[in-house]
């Protein structure tokens, strides 16, 4: 009996060791399949969010009354809510039930929820204010092209809704087109104009690009990955994954930036839908898209001329017209450009258009005075030299 007990004990211990070994192997297998993201300082998503700090278009937080109405949880202003994994999982599952994107919750997604809802929450509030300006435009054209409206959140991942965002890879604008891709979709770039920063034109180009990518992959997560890194990198990753078309299976074969792309997109979906639960409220943008309109500019015109003649701040003109690189609206034969203004200023422009083209700013007048003085000096010097020559 004693020997039997010893034998059973040995067998039990052996089983425990075997079980531990198998568990460790399985854990290693999982960790090699899924390595959590680490957000580095040079991550383009983080950089885009940080760029909002210098963007001067925000006015203030929502009024106390509106914030109070949104704050149904009665949080104190400084409170930063954090929830359990089970809560995040449940909420994202609810969003997924209404979405074609296959939204899931994991450690990568949690990393970006923490970025937007905790670490950079003031910038997220500023971005939410910009969403009030740009989302109506995005939704209009996504609907027109019969695309999922959730794609509007991709612009947050790409540029944090900074209209003049520029990445280290020279991608430009709200939808971050590089030169070659922009050219494919007829976004023109010249010394004065960059249509990759034109909100309307680049949104149309983005919709066409989404449509083309979906015709290739028939999977929205792969469309997002291809939008970020190009179809070539996605196709290469699929080949390395033995033809698997699951983003999470091919993720480790994608460029580092693209690995964080889909998780960030899911996190943005979550944060924008559950902002009040995280005690997040918009920092109001000074401008509203429904309160703007466009006029056609027929002759060369500078932002300074518009600003001084119409008493409109340079800051406003620059924000509403981000595609003009040097603050100059050019004029070419058979080619005109649009100027976006607040509706209250449109009437003045139409009535005084001719005089606006001839208007001289203070800087222009000062330059004319300096030029005239310089010409006088040149003339005096020339006369003096001529007199001296005659005397000799």
Image: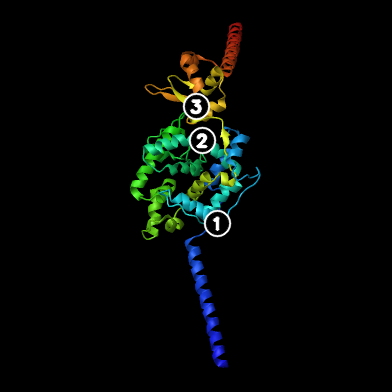
User: Counting other residues with Cα less than 10 Å from the Cα at mark 2, is it few (<14), some (14-19), or many (20 or more)?
Assistant: some
Asked if residue 343 can be seen in this view, the reply is yes
- For label 1, the SS is helix
Residue most toward the left? 215
Q: Quadrant of residue 284?
A: top right
Give the left or right position of residue 307, taking residue 190 as reference. Answer: right
- Left or right of residue 247: residue 361: right
Earlier in the chain: of badge 1 and badge 2, it is 1
Q: Look at the image and tell me in which quarter the N terminus lies.
A: bottom right
SS state under label 3? helix
Marks 2/3: CA–CA distance: 12 Å
Which x, y percent locates residue 365?
57, 15
Q: Residue at x 53, y 46 (%)?
A: 274
Which disc, if any, is residue 132? 2
Please state the horizontal and vertical placement of residue 19, each as a whole percent of the image: 51, 75
- Report which residue position mark 3 lands on: 291
Residue labelled with disc 1:
85
Q: CA distance from mark 1 to mark 2?
A: 29 Å
- Camera-side residue: 143 or 48? 143
x 50%, y 44%: residue: 157
**Residue 207, image x, y percentages:** 39, 39
């Amino acid at each position: 009996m004693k020997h039997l007990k010893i034998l059973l004990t040995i067998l039990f211990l052996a089983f425990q060791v075997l079980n531990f070994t198998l568990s460790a192997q399985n854990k290693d297998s999982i960790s090699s399949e899924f390595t959590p993201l680490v957000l580095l300082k040079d991550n383009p998503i983080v950089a885009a969010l940080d760029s909002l700090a210098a963007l001067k278009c925000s006015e203030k937080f929502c009024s106390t009354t509106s914030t109070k109405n949104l704050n149904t949880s009665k949080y104190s202003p400084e409170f930063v809510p954090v929830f359990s994994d089970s809560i995040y999982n449940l909420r994202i599952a609810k969003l997924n039930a209404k979405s074609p994107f296959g939204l899931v919750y994991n450690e990568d997604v949690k990393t970006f929820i923490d970025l937007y809802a905790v670490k950079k929450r003031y910038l997220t509030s500023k971005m939410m204010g910009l969403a009030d300006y740009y989302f109506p435009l995005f939704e209009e054209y996504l609907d027109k092209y019969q695309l999922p409206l959730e794609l509007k959140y991709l612009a947050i991942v790409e540029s944090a809704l900074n209209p003049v965002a520029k990445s280290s890879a020279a991608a430009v604008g709200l939808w971050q087109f590089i030169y070659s891709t922009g050219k494919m979709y007829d976004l023109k770039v010249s010394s004065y104009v960059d249509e990759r920063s034109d909100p309307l034109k680049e949104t149309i180009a983005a919709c066409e690009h989404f449509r083309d990518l979906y015709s290739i992959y028939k999977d929205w997560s792969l469309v997002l990955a291809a939008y970020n890194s190009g179809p070539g990198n996605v196709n290469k990753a699929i080949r390395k994954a033995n033809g698997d078309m699951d983003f999470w299976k091919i993720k480790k074969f994608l460029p580092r930036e693209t690995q964080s792309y889909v998780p960030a997109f899911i996190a943005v979906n979550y944060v924008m839908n559950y902002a009040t639960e995280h005690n997040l409220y918009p920092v109001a943008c000074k401008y509203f898209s429904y309160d703007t309109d466009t006029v056609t500019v027929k002759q060369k015109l500078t932002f300074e001329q518009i600003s001084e003649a119409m008493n409109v701040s340079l800051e406003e003109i620059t924000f509403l017209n981000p595609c003009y690189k040097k603050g100059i609206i050019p004029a070419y034969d058979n080619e005109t450009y649009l100027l976006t203004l607040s509706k209250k200023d449109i009437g003045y422009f139409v009535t005084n258009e001719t005089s606006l083209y001839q208007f001289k700013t203070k800087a222009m007048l000062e330059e004319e005075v300096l030029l005239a003085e310089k010409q006088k000096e040149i003339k005096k010097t020339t006369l003096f030299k001529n007199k001296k020559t005659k005397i000799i």
